[in-house]
Image (spheres, grey):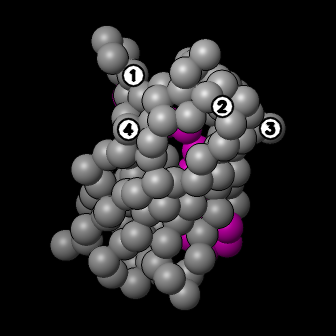
Amino acid sequence: QVQLVESGGGMVQAGGSLRLSCVASANIFSILVMGWYRQAPGKQRELVANIIIAGGRTNYADSVKGRFTISRDTAKNTVYLQMNSLKADDTAVYYCKGDTGLLSYWGQGTQVTVSS
């Protein structure tokens, strides 16, 4: 069982920045891929970015490329999402997800609100 705890959400003006953190309760190398997803009101949950823990390879949704950066700190069992140039459309609950290859784990979510 792996628990994921997100933090770092909040309210920011358009053009601003936030950094989200996701701390895993287990050794992060027990997780193959970790990712950030978001869900806006009335919309489906969508992938924002993910990272392969062992190699560090990253993948981004087109809507955030060039603005968001996902990274991991294996010593802290933590994955980050640096969000720059935020837009009102980025407003959503952001969730951290970890995939071990057999099981998937989700965090509780953190609200990001961008005011225009």
Identity, as a three-letter code, of the amino acid under mark 1: Ala
Q: Say which mark, if any, is on residue 8.
A: none
Is the residue marked by circle 4 packed among few (<14), some (14-19), or many (20+) residues within 10 Å? some
Quadrant of the drawing holding the N terminus: bottom left
Instruction: Locate residue 45, reporting x and y percent.
Output: 38, 28
Identity, as a three-letter code, of the amino acid under mark 2: Leu
Instruction: Locate residue 32, reporting x and y percent.
Output: 47, 67
The residue wearing badge 4 is 111
| Image point (66%, 25%), residue name | 14
| Image point (59%, 77%), residue name | 73
Instruction: Locate residue 88, reporting x and y percent.
Output: 57, 19
Identify the element where label 2 is drawn: loop
Residue sitting nearer the eye, 100 or 46 = 46
The residue wearing badge 3 is 66
Identify the element where label 4 is drawn: strand
Residue sitting nearer the eye, 7 or 74 = 7
> Residue 51 lies in magenta, yes or no?
yes
The residue wearing badge 1 is 40
The first of marks 1 and 2 along the sequence is 1
The residue wearing badge 2 is 86
> Residue 12 lies in magenta, yes or no?
no
Identity, as a three-letter code, of the amino acid under mark 3: Gly
